[in-house]
Amino acid sequence: MTTAPRQVIIGLDVGTTGVKAVAFGLASPWRTLAVRLYPLLRPAPGHEVQDPAAILTAASAALSECVASIGTAEVIGVSLSAAMHGLMALDADLQPITPLVTWADGRASEEAADLARQRVTLDLQQTTGTPVHPMTPMAKLVWFHHNDPATWKAARWWAGLKDYLLLWLTGTLATELSSASGTGLLDVSTRTWSPLALAASGVDPQRLPEILATTDVLALDRQVAATVGLPAGTPVAVGAADGPLANLGTGAIAPGVAGLSLGTSGAIRTAVDGPHPDRHGRLFCYALTDAIWVVGGAVSNGAEVLRWAERILGGGPPAGADSTSPPDTTTHVPNEQVAPSSDGLVMLPFLFPERAPLWDQDLAGACLGLRHHHRGAHLRRAAMEGVCLQMRYLLDRVDHSYPVASIRATGGAFGSALWRDLMAAALDRPMTVVGDEDGTALGAAALGLLAFGAAPSLDQALAALGGVSAGVPATAPAEQVAVFADIRQRLTTLLGALGRTAGIEAGAAVPVEP
């Protein structure tokens, strides 16, 4: 490691299963990292929540360790990234009265389906840039309104993860444009809470936080400052949501470059010059800054599908794998040699309610083409190929409106060479694996430099922090690309055969005549 710099900025990245506090040296490639994990809780079927107190404890511990590691360097500020789509209720004293209901929570499935059947759906998607889905705070609000009247009445505020973190760090309850753009409640054209979405959810706008710019700056609370070892009043950039910041931190903000992440779930995003809601409602549109937005989609079924296959088959991580790694840094791979395309086995990997590009929470997974010669290793590989195939369908949807020439890929799954090879073959684009697990924190730090006036542009901010990792090219040979083309073709045939098995004409809904 190089000599500690005179000045650093800390990117605080609070995600679904853990927090990273990363100190980046200014005009130096120096950095130091502290990590704390916390669980995703499942108190009831379809409920995926987190304990707000556990999140703050982890964030405080990571930030304290990071500050302690920088020695005599001056911290010019902290910049914040947070996972999107969470919702929690606060009382009049700003205390939580619910857990944080995460993006993965499916309790609002019926409410989202009901909204999707209404004529207002397309208007909502065009207004907010967010497809109607159980993940959205808007759908969750409808659920609370209909199913938990006691909480609905007691809630003085409805807040997201970023809002709660800002409250803890600065004493100010507020959100910012990026996180607000993922709620399904924001009018992306006016950058204010949408009357249409508010009416659909039933929430009073006075119960929602003020929307700040992603480059606004607040001051670190005195008590928190004393706990983590920073001066009171240290500047805190409110920052943005983790998805758009991941694009920034991995170098995927230029036209024609898509950012891809693969962990528990997966996503593909490309930067655009303002809010451009998808007229078909298949892609989201989220803000990074007022001028830079990202268009893309997220799949619910990422590397977690392979973990599921390992669990049911009794397999485990390969020799040497770190069992203490965060849940979104999967390195599990099939431990037997299996031919490409899994000897005819194709998996539809819909274990969790699927998001982009289908947005169908009722779609169930399946294994097609199953034969007696298939073993556990075939299912493991088919799980990986199925995930990669869904990412290709998502890429095709993005590419239709915003042509993608190259991909910057990141995520714990790409610690596996097989994941890298399969994804490159499925996408059939020049792909660079950045492999920088600090990418989102780097994006937060760069946005913070812009907010603090320490850099005139995001590009120059990234350069001041040592730049983005050059990455490792992952280009698949032509024969591997052909394998995925064959899988796509066979999938159509297998779905037709499935229809015949059920006594239904393939692609139709009429019984087959005897």
Image: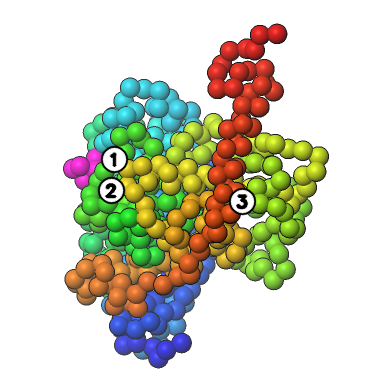
Residue at 77% x, 44% y is 374
Assess whether mark 3 and mark 2 are in contact (beta carbons under 8 angstroms).
no
Predominant SS of the magenta segment: loop
Q: Observer-nearest residue: 481 or 180?
A: 481
Q: Disc 2 versus disc 1: distance between alpha carbons?
A: 23 Å
SS assignment at label 3: helix
**Pick the front one: 301 or 114:** 301
Q: Work out how far the residue at label 1 is from the one at label 3, CA to CA, in angstroms.
A: 31 Å
Tell me which residue sits at (31%, 81%) in the image.
26
* CB within 8 Å, label 1 to label 3: no
Camera sees residue 182: no
Q: Is residue 191 above or below residue 166?
A: above
What stretch of residues is rendered in magenta?
Answer: 186-191
Q: Residue 277's mark? A: 1
Reply above or below: 345 against 448.
above
- Give amino acid for label 2: Pro
502 left or right, relative to 398 = right
Q: Quadrant of residue 408?
A: bottom left
Give the residue pinned by disc 2: 209
**Would residue 187 be counted in the magenta stretch?**
yes
Residue extending furthest toward the top: 514
Horizontal and vertical percent for residue 96? 42, 49
Work out whether residue 216 or residue 409 is closer to the camera in this orientation and state it.
Answer: 409
Q: Is residue 143 magenta?
A: no
SS at mark 1?
loop
Q: Residues within 10 Å of mark 1 (few under 14, many from 20)?
A: many
- Mark toward the start of the polypeptide (2 vs 3): 2
Give percent across and percent down for residue 293: 28, 52
Which disc number belongs to residue 384? 3
